[in-house]
Image (tube, coloured by chain):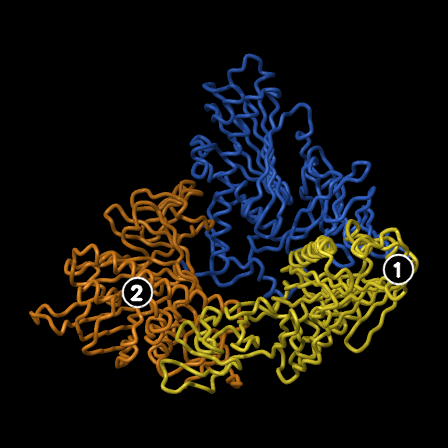
Chain colours: A yellow, B orange, C blue
């Protein structure tokens, strides 16, 4: 049997690592945030979401500063949220602007109002230190709002930690097993792989030349039976998500200018609590923009494959929660992209923690990792 | 943003303060306690309730001293409770009087039997130090059993801490907001307020002269459209409840001796666990004693208004339980009656705790309160 | 009132004592373990159960060494379990024999594979230190697979700690109370009792001469109305179970060689978690082997009586879990067999715990026991 490693300083984030706050996360789809107050839990905190009269989205702490009444159970009055208990009103910045029982509003009273940015179909939120909330840090998802692309999309509420979800998305070796009946193909497993670790981004590239396209590409592109070159660039963009860029080149295309087909797959997810996530996925293509059959096919195929991931990660989370202590784990060569990501996430998470004596600091992510 | 106050010695009870044991609480309605064993959890302890052959109510520890079998699953034999597992029998004082497998009953064996007092429709229990159980400490609710009064009543099992419930009842400024559609009236918010802190009782008085009565008084009193004087005396009577005395004077009454109408509202509640309470309410009037329509109207109106309180307090409890740590809170002038009550409750609760080093003692109610 | 005993070093196992690992426990019925992977939790650990191609049962840790995917959600390939996530394959010894994404299998990778023994209708597992797993330690249950015996059997998933279950089975004084309507008889309570403490086995013997048989024996043996001698030998065989041997002698049998009737009752149970158990019971007889009516009667009667035990132990467990701290308990003379068993179980459990300072060691079973 393997000897249990001495409880060493952990080097990887795992399902117990404190959630990273200094990051833009998706809070909601744009259409979910309206003039009706919406309650949601993000990063372990309940928030209330709404739009100002001018349409700007607002995301605030849901707990009234007075007696913790959830503001989402109150009402919207113009741009202000009015608590349903004593009528304490907050402006979109979280500042108290009225308290009916007082002659003068206690304007020094404030609750957290989080920086938000609306980008196409998404509303992003920054729940960490406000002065670090630079919109330039939001991952680029321009294709989601471009007329040159058509997108199908879906949502899962998942019982999983977000680190495990990121590792799943950076991991190419589970395709042939977990997704054997959906998107896994033996050719893909044979393709070459390059890993790039650029700052806090981890990127993997694959190329597969002169092979038949898998159904998930062949069918919507109408390339079944043809030979194609296939390129994939898949990246841990931030703790908030993973984006995969695929390019298929039809080797027999009569017009080389029309030989390329692109699919961008955008996986965005936000921890609800430590062991659950909100997961929004988007499958975008730059071809057959009005092809309803292609949209239906891609929706159905995506749902089937992602359900397999959701099931696997749920089972793992349940196994881990049932377990006695943090599980040891073994890692192998193909896990390198995931381990690179987990090192980044541990570093980001720990940088946000109050300083602790070294021994105690090892606590939250005390997992023994063996690498082979 | 507000700076978080340094973790100071807390001055107010909150939802984490240990439950006060040395107090008479309502255990049950008189009619609930019969010759059939009844199990209930009060102050975090499961008890069994029944009546002796002479009708006297008995409330005992539910756990058999032998192997923790719940006595409520056993049976009543005369005045004794017989355990359903090995037949260990207890008299109403909790003393073992028989054990079938032994030649001599182990009469030194005892379980807790709690002092009880039956008063009209209620059975009160004292689960603290028995030698302090003075029946004179039971709040006066004589009107509940007087032929000069008619009472409508109801029960809620609520997800709330009892401190929050007390604060809600001492708080007049939520009427116009939370109860805007039921019992809140703008006139009431304008009325004068006096606060009296007498020993462990907190009392608030309001008077409102020469105004139309709100429907909740006007309709059952048949004074709609008349001008009235309105007086209210509402008090934190003990940790077990709050009583409000209202008097309406019909300014145009032909006979001044018949110008007064009284309504006593009795709110009695007992913690089940730290975050749930049993809540019995009573609306008693000294007019229209046989007026079935008035009874129906008052029942319906009370239920509607109290449901609003139940909802609000439940939402707050859920928000507090979801939250990361005890919430900070802000307090304002109109919160003074509630804060006075919370100081009393903290003092009473802490007096029952084993002595601790000062720092540790601050633990159970470590809430930062800001007052404005 | 009884004074609470000073927190002394505990002398008895109770519902908080760490589970004993070094013991053969029943893992499953033989028929449950097939070529389909089966997941079960035993002693707080999730395991996967299956049969090799040659029929040998295998019980392994359910958590893949790589990323904790539950192997029971994977598939069986020959004698190997293949993880459903990345295809990591394990042989029945728990050694990794294949990892599709690697050129060479990481054969140093191992998960726990637990010693198993199949005996008639049962599969036994040893989840403690493997080098102590001597099959000679499995309690003898030869009658369960003998053609000279007929057995009826059932299963309960129970909310109970296994110590309380053992105590129930060693305890004869609850029959007349808890089982008053099923198997309890007043004669039995009068019978003599001898207790034998042999190593880690506790055995109680009873004899009752020249009395009418209780229905549970009289009816299937067709001895109603006759006088019989009745002998019982009931034993705490190991932490995994309790076996009762009953012998009835028909005093008026024409042929003395055919006067004896035997019933062996085998109670086998395995902790799932600390507060739940898997419970398999077997009622075996050496008479009326093909008597379907006797089988039906014994099944129905056993189910009724055991349901009473299941209810009682569930209620106790719920009462204990609701309670504030480990309950004190009182013990009496008839509890001696149970207390002897609880001393053995505490000794066995503590022998498996890492050494601790004396004070801390008292922790897990800190119950104050009074004996009278």
The subunit carrying tag 1 is A
Q: In front: B36, or C344?
A: B36
Q: In front: A137, or A246?
A: A246
Asked where in the image residue B371 lies, by quadrant, the reply is bottom left
- Residue at the extreme top: C254
Q: Residues under labels 1 and 2: Cα distance?
A: 78 Å
Q: Is residue B304 left or right of residue A266?
A: left
Q: Nearer the viewer, mark 1 or mark 2?
A: 1
Figure check: C89 above or below A337: above
- Where residue A103 sits in the image (x, y, percent)? 36, 86
Q: Assign the N terminus of chain C to one quadrant of the image.
A: bottom left
Give the number of callouts.
2
Q: Is residue A327 left or right of residue B285?
A: right
Asked where in the image residue C232 lies, by quadrant, the reply is top right
Residue located at (54% from left, 76% from top): A60
The subunit carrying tag 2 is B
Badge 1: residue crowd in 10 Å (few <14, some 14–19, many ≥20): many
Asked where in the image residue A124 lies, by quadrant, the reply is bottom right
Badge 2: residue crowd in 10 Å (few <14, some 14–19, many ≥20): many
Q: In front: B331, or B219?
A: B219
Query: What residue does disc 2 label?
Result: B267
- Where residue A288 sits in the image (x, y, percent)? 77, 60
- Where residue B10 sits in the image (x, y, percent)? 45, 80
**Res. A250 mark:** 1
Q: In front: B121, or A157?
A: A157
Mark yes or no: residue B203 visible: no
Q: Secondary structure at mark 2?
A: strand
Residue located at (69% from left, 54% from top): A311
- Where residue A203 sits in the image (x, y, percent)? 81, 70
Q: Secondary structure at mark 1?
A: strand
Mark yes or no: residue C341 visible: yes
């Amino acid at each position: 049997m393997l000897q249990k490693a001495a409880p060493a300083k952990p080097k990887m984030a795992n399902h117990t690592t404190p959630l990273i706050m200094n990051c833009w996360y998706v809070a909601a789809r744009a259409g979910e945030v309206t003039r009706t107050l919406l309650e949601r839990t993000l990063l372990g905190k309940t928030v209330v979401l709404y739009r100002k009269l001018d349409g700007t989205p607002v995301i605030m702490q849901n707990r009234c500063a007075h007696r913790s009444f959830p503001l989402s159970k109150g009402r919207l009055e113009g741009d202000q949220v009015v608590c349903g208990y004593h009528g304490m009103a907050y402006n979109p910045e979280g500042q108290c602007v009225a308290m009916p029982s007082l002659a003068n509003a206690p304007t020094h009273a404030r609750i957290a109002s989080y920086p938000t940015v609306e980008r196409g179909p998404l509303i992003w939120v920054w729940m960490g230190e406000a002065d670090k909330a630079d919109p330039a840090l939001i991952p680029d998802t321009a294709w989601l709002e471009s007329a040159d692309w058509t997108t199908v999309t879906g949502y899962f509420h998942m019982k999983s930690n977000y680190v495990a979800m990121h590792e799943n998305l950076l991991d190419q070796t589970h395709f042939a097993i977990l997704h054997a009946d959906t998107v896994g193909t033996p050719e893909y497993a044979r393709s070459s792989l390059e890993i790039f670790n650029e700052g806090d981004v981890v990127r993997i590239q694959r190329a597969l030349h002169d092979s038949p396209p898998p159904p998930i590409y062949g069918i919507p592109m109408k390339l079944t039976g043809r030979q194609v070159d296939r390129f994939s660039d898949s990246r841990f963009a931030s703790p908030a998500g993973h984006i995969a860029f695929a390019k298929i080149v039809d080797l027999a295309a009569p017009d080389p200018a029309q030989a390329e087909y692109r699919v961008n797959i955008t996986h965005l997810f936000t921890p609800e609590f430590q062991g659950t996530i909100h997961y929004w996925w988007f499958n975008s293509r730059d071809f057959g923009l009005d092809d309803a059959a292609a949209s239906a096919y891609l929706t159905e195929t995506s749902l089937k494959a992602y359900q397999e991931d959701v099931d696997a990660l749920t089972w793992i989370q349940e196994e881990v929660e049932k377990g006695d202590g943090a599980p040891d784990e073994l890692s192998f060569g193909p896990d390198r992209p995931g381990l690179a990501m987990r090192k980044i996430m541990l570093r980001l998470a720990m940088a946000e923690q109050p300083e602790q004596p070294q021994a105690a600091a090892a606590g939250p992510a005390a997992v023994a990792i063996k690498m082979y």
